[in-house]
Image: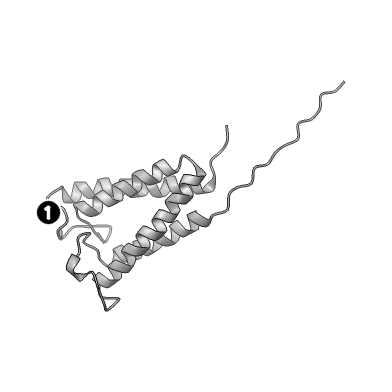
């Protein structure tokens, strides 16, 4: 049996964490006011049902991606691009970046500063996963039987 690549373990771990956070989030927010503001925090992060759905989907994708190193790297790119864009949007929403061309969209994910840091960290982790070198396969020479 071939072992897992480090990138697969990382994808599975990230997926599991996001899935658990999403499920716990639903126990705090329920399903009402789906994309609205909830005064509910989970470990300092603002959440709402839409945000929880995103976490559950990302978690499920991470667990599925852990099945192969190629899928795990693709998952890394998805994290990098997706959470990178959400982090930039969150920085605009919270006023760190002064101009928000998407201000008409409001804040459907109920983002706050803590979310922005998590999304920046997730994007960086995704980039690391995407470019992580593959473990080299080592072929062992089989000893010849004694004659």
Residue 118 position, x and y percent, is 35, 61
Asked which secondary structure carries label 1, the reply is: loop
Outermost residue on the top side: it is: 147
Q: Quadrant of residue 107?
A: bottom left
Residue 13 position, x and y percent, is 42, 47
User: Which quadrant of the figure contains the C terminus?
Assistant: top right
Residue 17 position, x and y percent, is 36, 49
Q: Quadrant of residue 94?
A: bottom left
Residue drawn at point x = 24 percent, y = 54 percent:
51
Outermost residue on the left side: it is: 32
Residue drawn at point x = 14 percent, y = 58 percent:
36
Residue drawn at point x = 31 percent, y = 47 percent:
57
Up the image or down, 49 lies above or below 45; here it is above
User: Which quadrant of the figure contains the N terminus?
Assistant: top right
Q: Quadrant of residue 112?
A: bottom left
User: Dot 1 corresponds to which residue?
Assistant: 33
């Amino acid at each position: 049996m071939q072992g897992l690549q480090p990138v697969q373990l990382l994808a599975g771990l990230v997926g599991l964490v996001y899935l658990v956070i999403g499920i716990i989030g639903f126990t705090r927010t329920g399903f009402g006011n789906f994309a609205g503001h909830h005064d509910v925090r989970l470990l300092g992060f603002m959440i709402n049902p839409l945000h929880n759905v995103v976490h559950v989907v990302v978690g499920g994708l991470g667990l599925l991606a852990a099945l192969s190193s190629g899928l795990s790297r693709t998952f890394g790119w998805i994290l990098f691009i997706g959470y990178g864009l959400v982090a930039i949007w969150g920085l605009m929403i919270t006023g760190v970046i002064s101009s928000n061309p998407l201000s008409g969209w409001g804040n459907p994910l109920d983002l706050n500063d803590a979310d922005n840091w998590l999304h920046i960290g997730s994007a960086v982790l995704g980039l690391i996963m995407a470019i992580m070198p593959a473990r080299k396969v080592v072929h062992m020479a089989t000893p010849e039987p004694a004659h």
